[in-house]
């Protein structure tokens, strides 16, 4: 009986873990799609309560509403021609996206950190470095 209880507990933990990983992967995929399309509004749907955004070596911490405006303005000024995904991964409860945003005004190294939040994820940091 004890074995069956332990086995059931392990199965429940595994299912919860797989669900969390899948939800996090969904957020990563949605963010990659928004970077490729240059859709700041779609990306902003995944912002956490506070978002650290670095543009041109200037870092600011914004509320989700302020960050939405900043990202929308960035993509208005630098429309995406394409986004090349270089790497994704995760450490603990944080996933990351590394890539290159290609625009007519220059290419940007992009780094996005996503923190697990409940069953999904929330962007906590976005960095655009002009190459």
Image (tube, helix red, strand yellow):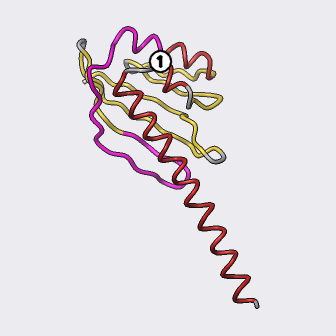
Tell me where residue 61 appears, x and y as whole percent.
57, 23
Q: Is residue 103 above or below residue 94?
A: above
Q: Looking at the image, is 126 positioned above or below residue 7?
A: above
Q: Callout 1: few (<14), some (14-19), or many (20+) C-alpha neighbours within 10 Å?
A: many
Residue 15: percent from the left, percent from the top? 60, 64
Query: In the visual, does 97 lie left or right of 103?
Result: right
Q: In the rendered structure, which segment of residues is drawn in magenta?
A: 72-97
Would you place residue 1 above or below residue 26 in this image?
below
| Residue linked to disc 1 | 71
Q: Main secondary structure of the magenta part?
A: strand
Please give left or right for residue 10 compared with residue 24 in the image: right
Q: Nearer the viewer, residue 82 or 48?
A: 82
> Magenta segment: does it hold 83?
yes
Residue 18 falls within the magenta-colored stretch: no
Q: Which residue is located at x 31 percent, y 35 percent?
A: 99
- Image coordinates of residue 23 in percent, x first then y, are 55, 48
Question: Which residue is found at the position 44% from the left and 33% from the top?
Answer: 31
Res 111 → quadrant: top left
Q: Is residue 76 above or below residue 44?
A: above
Quadrant in which the N terminus appears: bottom right
The residue at 63%/48% (across/down) is 119
Residue 113: % across, % down: 48, 39
Q: Which residue occupies 56% across, 51% down?
A: 93
Question: Could you say which quadrant of the image residue 58 lies in?
Answer: top left
Tell me the quarter of the image containing the C terminus: top left
């Amino acid at each position: 009986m004890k074995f069956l209880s332990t086995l059931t507990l392990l199965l429940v933990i595994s299912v919860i873990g797989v669900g969390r990983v899948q939800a996090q992967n969904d957020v990563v995929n949605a963010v990659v799609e928004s970077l490729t399309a240059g859709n700041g509004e779609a990306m902003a749907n995944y912002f956490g309560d506070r978002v650290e955004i670095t543009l041109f070596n200037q870092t600011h911490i914004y509320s989700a509403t302020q960050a939405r405006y900043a990202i929308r303005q960035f993509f208005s000024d630098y429309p995406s021609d394409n986004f090349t995904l270089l790497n994704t991964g995760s450490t603990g409860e944080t996933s990351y996206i590394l890539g290159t945003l290609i625009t007519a005004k220059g290419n940007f190294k992009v780094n996005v950190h996503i923190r697990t939040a409940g069953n999904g994820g929330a962007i906590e940091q976005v960095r655009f470095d002009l190459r």
